Image (spheres, grey):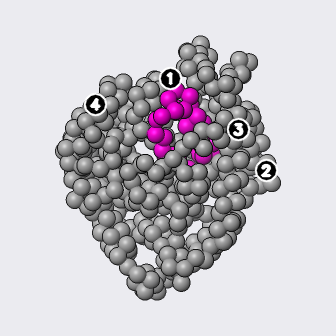
Amino acid sequence: MLKKYQRIVPENLWNRLARNLIYDSKQLLLYCGIKLPRQPKAAEEYAELIKRFTSGTQFGIICDPITSRIHFEPEYIQNIIDQATRFDFPVYDKSFGPGGVAGYISEGDRVDEPLKNPDLNDILRQAILAQNNEMPFSYVSARQLSLFETEQFSVMTRIFDGPIFFPISTLQGVDEAQRYLEDGNYVIAIQTVFQSPLTFSFKEKIEVFIDCVSRGIPISLVTQPFSGQSAPMTPYGLAVLAFSEFLAGMALAYSINPDTKIINGALPTMCTPGNKPKLKLGSVVHNYVNYLVSYTSRLLDIASIQSGCTMEGAVHEPTILETDYQTARAMILWENLFEGWHMIRHTYGFLSDMASFSFTKAEADITALRHIQSLDENGINAILANNVKLNRDYNRAQEIYETPTLIFQREDGSLVDVIIETVEHFNGDFGRHEHTLKNVPVEWF
């Protein structure tokens, strides 16, 4: 019996995990906090920004002048969480959509298929794709940084009439976002405030973030720690770091303008350790880590958009339901097994670890998704019965769902210490900490 049709998960286990995730994230922000980049005159250059974040918070956000770190009181974080609500966000629960920003367009399936730089026509195709398939939200899924910063608004809003996530990196882009928001479009600005682990991003990025927040433009806060690289190797450790960075960003936003809508866009990313890391975006565990972050956000009533349904590799191979195996497997997991989540990005079209976007794959992915969503219990069981590998993977995923401690361990409360030690003594490189070497089980990938 599938989860969609019968409650089989001991919900208290997931609630306990979420509670631990919230507590550990607060502890990390209290004792470790956010540090400045390692660059000359960083304290001087960031001084005015830090003053803006810390003034008026009644010691909720504190700057240590000796270490130049910002620390967050748990009570202050909780007060901000208590003010959050997702009920006025115009995207319904369990929404699949596009997402992410690829740098190139791939039109074919061959390994040697040449990549091309996206142009305005490609952005137009993205808008048409989302509108024709009645997507609940849309993205500018392929756009090179610094190009089409202002043009993207008119192209997308002319076609797609739902909420749209826009990558914004310049003050001119903020001006355009505000203009289109005032014209009645639901514009969300994608912003990155930190570099993992727990380090302020470039000063220019923070200034754009402050400008967006000051004007009340809805913000999707994206953090992307990589396991074994810029985050702990363990799934729970990866989730803790991603969620703590989101909470810190939300606290900074509320210190500027508490009326701004903040969306949890944390993207905890499974990755192999070592000098030549490989992203494992299509693994079951990658989907589970993103699900835990999303589930926790749901309990806190925070609007949340997480990563799922993507794949490894650069080639689109229609092996199941006319699309890629990892994509279809994740669609079935999110649609029929997981519950208590808000939005999923990266549902369709991405290749090469999201470096490129394929319209051929996007159309195949959407067709597969619609087919899966149309099936009842017997239909899903038929797909599983006709694919030995998928059936095995689904059963294993269901086992994890019923007993999430199989992959999510709090590690006796020592995880926060591991993160602090890595930030302090290894410059944020988790590959140099023995914790990573002890936690590399092959079955996660």
For the residue pair 99 and 3, the one nearer the viewer reads as 3
- 244 drawn magenta: yes
Say whether disc 2 or disc 1 marks the residue closer to the N-terminus.
Answer: 1
Say whether disc 3 or disc 1 marks the residue closer to the N-terminus.
Answer: 3
Position of 201 relative to 185 (above/below): above
Magenta residues span: 241-268
Dot 1: within a 10 Å radius of its alpha carbon, few (fewer than 14), some, or many (20 or more) residues? some
Nearer to us: label 3 or label 2: 3
Query: At 71% across and 17% down in the image, what residue appears?
Result: 65
Q: Could you tell me the amino acid type at mark 4?
A: Arg
For disc 1, the marked residue is 203
For disc 4, the marked residue is 179
Real-space CA distance between mark 4 and mark 1, rounded to the nearest whole angstrom: 24 Å
Real-space CA distance between mark 2 and mark 4, rounded to the nearest whole angstrom: 47 Å
Q: Could you tell me the amino acid type at mark 1?
A: Lys
Say whether disc 3 or disc 4 marks the residue closer to the N-terminus.
Answer: 3
| SS at circle 3 | helix
Real-space CA distance between mark 3 and mark 4, rounded to the nearest whole angstrom: 36 Å
Residue 207: horizontal and vertical position, in percent?
Answer: 46, 23
Asked if residue 321 lies left or right of residue 33, the reply is left
Name which quarter of the figure residue 270 lies in. Answer: bottom right
Asked if residue 304 lies left or right of residue 359, the reply is right
Any part of residue 40 in sight:
no
